[in-house]
Image (cartoon, helix red, strand yellow):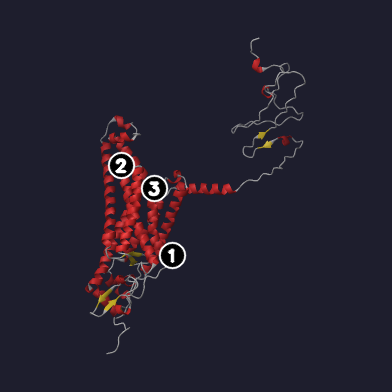
C-alpha cells in the first residue's frame, strides 16, 4: 500500500485535518466532522464565506464604515465636552462615560477596517487572539465597549429611578459609586472573558468571543445587567404613569398655584400635582438619556440573543455530523460551488439579513448619541472658540509716530471715531489769569466730551476766531463782573 502522507483524502472542498499543525491559530474554531476513526474533514477557512453569499463581505465592510462614522461622532462629543463650557454642552459624567464606552465599542469595528487582517492562520484554522494582535485588539474593544455601554446604561437608569421614584438627590457618593461600578465591572468582565474564553474570527473581520465558557463569563452577566436596566426603566415609567393619574384627580386649589419645593426635606411631602410637575420636569430634562439607554440595551440584548443562537448552531454542527449532512453532501456534489448549496446552509446559520441588522445597529450607536446628546449650541460654541483663538493671534500694529496733519480746514480739529462716528473736539484753551491775587478758578479745567451712544448731538468745531462754540459757566467762562466770584461761597454768611 502506498504512502498517503501529505495527500488530502477528503473530497473537495474539505481538507484533511492531519495535513495542518495544531500549534497555531485557534484550533477549536475549525469546523470539522469525523468521517472515520482516522479521517476528519474540515471546512476551509473562513466559515462565513461558505454559508453566506459573496455580498456578505461587502455588507460587513459597510457596517465597519458606519462604525467609523459613529466613532467620529463620539470623538466630536468627547472633544466638545472637554473644550466647550458646560452651558454649551450640558455635560454630565454619566453622559461622558457613556459616550466613551460606545466609542470603545466602535473601535472594535474600526481597527479591522484600518488593518485589513487575514482571518485565517492556515486553510482550515482561524486566527485567535494569541496569533493575531488585530484580532485580540478588536475583540477586546468590542467586549469592553459592550460591557461599558450596558453598565453606564444601568447606572443612568438607576440614577433616574432614584430621583423620580424615591426623591433621592444623587450627589458625590453616587458619583463615586458610579465610577467604581461603571469601570470596575467591565474591566473584571473583560478579564474573565479573555482568560476563560478568548476571542477569534467567527464571522466577519471583527473577532468575537469563543464558545467555551462564554455563557458563564460574558452572556449571562451581561444579560443580567441589561435585564435589570429594562426592569428599572419600566418601573420608572410605571411610577410616572401613576403620578400622572393621581394628578388628574387632585383638584386642590392650593396645589395649582404652588411652586416646587426648593429644599430637599420637602420633596417627601409633595402633593400629587406638585409630584407630577416635578416628574414632568425631570423627564423633560432626561428624555434624551432615556432614549439612548433604551437603544443601547435593545442592541445588546438583540446581539446577545442572535450570537448565542448562532454559536450553539455552529457548535452542534461540530458535535453532530447529521446536522450538516445534507449541506456537506451538496458541497461535495457541486465540487465546492457554495452558491448551489446556500439554501441548505440556511438551516445551519442565522440568516444574512438578521446578522447585518445586528451589526448595523451596533455600528449606529455613535450616530444615535450625536443626535440625542448633541446640541446646536455645540456648533456655536466651537465657532466662538475658533474665532477667539484666531482673533488672539491677530494683533493690530499702531505706529507711535502716527501724526494727524494740521490744516487750516475745520476738520483738522476733529477726530472721527471709527465705531460711532462721533466728533471729538479739542479742549478750549483756558485763559491764563493775570498777575496778582485773584480768586481761584474752580471751573477752569474743561472736561473731555464723550458722545452718548444714542445721542444726535456732537461737539462743534472751534470757530475761526479761536473762541469756543458755546461759552458756558461750566467751562470757566463767566460773564463780566463775575470773574472774582467764588461759586462755592456765594451763600456763606458774612
Between disc 2 and disc 3, whose residue precedes? 3
Q: Which mark is residue 164?
A: 2
Q: Residue furthest top?
A: 494
Residue 152 in sight here: no
> Considering only vertical position in the picture, is 447 above or below 276?
above
Quadrant of res 102 = bottom left
- The residue beneath circle 3 is 93
Question: How far is mark 3 from mark 1, CA to CA?
Answer: 30 Å
Disc 1 element: helix
Along the viewing direction, whichever of 394 and 357 lies nearer the viewer: 394
Question: How far is mark 2 from mark 3, CA to CA?
Answer: 19 Å
Specify few, some or many for label 2: CA neighbours under 10 Å numbering under 14, 14-19, or 20 or more.
Answer: many
Residue shown at 32%/32% (left/top)? 256
Disc 3 element: helix
In the drawing, does residue 64 fall left or right of residue 474?
A: left
> Considering only vertical position in the picture, is 153 above or below 356?
above
> Considering only vertical position in the picture, is 209 above or below 177?
below
Between disc 3 and disc 1, whose residue precedes? 3
Specify few, some or many for label 3: CA neighbours under 10 Å numbering under 14, 14-19, or 20 or more.
Answer: few
Where is residue 239 shown, x and y percent of the image? 27, 43
- The residue beneath circle 1 is 114
Quarter of the image with the C terminus in it? top right
Residue shown at 43%/65% (left/top)? 114
Disc 2 element: helix
Quadrant of res 205 = bottom left
Amino acid at each position: 500500500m502506498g504512502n498517503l502522507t501529505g495527500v488530502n483524502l477528503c473530497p473537495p472542498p474539505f481538507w484533511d485535518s492531519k495535513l495542518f499543525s495544531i500549534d497555531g491559530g485557534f484550533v477549536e474554531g475549525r469546523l470539522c466532522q469525523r468521517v472515520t476513526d482516522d479521517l476528519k474533514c474540515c471546512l476551509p477557512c473562513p466559515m462565513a464565506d461558505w454559508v453566506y453569499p459573496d455580498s456578505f463581505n461587502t455588507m460587513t465592510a459597510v457596517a465597519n464604515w458606519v462604525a467609523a462614522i459613529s466613532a467620529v461622532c463620539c470623538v466630536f462629543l468627547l472633544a466638545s465636552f472637554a473644550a466647550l463650557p458646560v452651558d454649551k454642552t450640558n455635560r454630565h459624567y454619566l453622559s461622558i462615560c457613556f459616550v466613551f464606552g460606545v466609542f470603545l465599542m466602535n473601535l472594535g469595528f474600526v481597527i479591522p477596517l484600518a488593518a485589513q487582517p487575514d482571518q485565517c492562520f492556515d486553510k482550515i484554522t482561524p486566527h485567535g487572539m494569541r496569533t493575531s494582535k488585530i484580532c485580540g485588539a478588536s475583540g477586546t474593544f468590542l467586549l469592553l465597549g459592550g460591557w461599558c455601554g450596558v453598565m453606564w446604561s444601568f447606572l443612568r437608569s438607576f440614577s433616574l429611578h432614584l430621583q423620580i421614584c424615591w426623591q433621592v438627590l444623587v450627589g458625590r457618593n453616587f458619583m463615586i459609586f458610579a465610577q467604581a461600578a461603571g469601570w470596575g465591572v467591565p474591566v473584571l468582565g473583560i478579564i474573565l472573558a479573555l482568560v476563560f474564553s478568548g476571542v477569534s474570527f467567527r464571522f466577519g473581520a471583527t473577532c468575537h468571543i469563543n464558545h467555551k465558557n462564554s455563557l458563564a463569563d460574558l452572556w449571562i452577566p451581561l444579560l443580567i445587567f441589561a435585564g435589570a436596566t429594562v426592569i428599572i426603566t419600566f418601573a420608572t415609567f410605571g411610577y410616572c404613569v401613576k403620578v400622572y393619574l393621581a394628578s388628574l384627580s387632585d383638584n386642590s386649589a392650593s396645589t395649582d398655584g404652588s411652586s416646587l419645593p426648593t429644599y430637599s426635606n420637602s420633596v417627601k411631602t409633595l402633593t400629587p400635582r406638585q409630584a407630577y410637575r416635578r416628574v414632568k420636569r425631570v423627564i423633560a430634562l432626561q428624555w434624551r438619556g432615556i432614549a439612548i439607554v433604551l437603544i443601547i440595551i435593545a442592541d445588546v440584548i438583540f446581539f446577545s440573543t442572535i450570537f448565542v443562537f448562532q454559536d450553539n448552531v455552529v457548535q452542534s454542527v461540530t458535535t453532530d455530523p447529521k446536522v450538516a449532512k445534507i449541506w456537506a453532501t451538496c458541497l461535495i456534489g457541486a465540487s465546492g460551488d457554495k452558491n448551489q448549496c446556500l439554501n441548505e446552509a440556511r438551516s445551519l446559520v442565522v440568516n444574512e439579513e438578521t446578522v447585518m441588522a445586528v451589526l448595523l445597529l451596533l455600528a449606529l450607536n455613535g450616530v444615535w448619541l450625536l443626535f440625542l446628546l448633541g446640541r446646536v449650541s455645540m456648533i456655536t460654541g466651537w465657532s466662538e472658540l475658533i474665532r477667539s483663538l484666531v482673533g488672539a493671534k491677530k494683533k493690530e500694529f499702531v505706529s507711535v509716530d502716527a501724526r494727524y496733519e494740521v490744516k487750516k480746514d475745520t476738520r483738522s480739529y476733529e477726530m472721527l471715531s471709527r465705531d460711532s462716528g462721533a466728533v471729538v473736539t479739542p479742549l478750549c484753551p483756558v485763559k491764563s489769569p493775570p498777575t496778582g491775587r485773584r480768586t481761584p478758578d474752580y471751573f477752569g479745567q474743561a472736561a473731555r466730551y464723550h458722545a452718548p451712544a444714542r445721542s444726535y448731538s456732537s461737539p462743534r468745531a472751534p470757530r475761526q476766531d479761536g473762541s469756543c462754540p458755546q461759552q458756558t459757566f461750566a467751562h470757566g467762562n463767566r460773564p463780566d463782573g463775575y470773574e472774582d466770584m467764588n461759586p462755592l461761597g456765594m451763600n456763606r454768611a458774612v
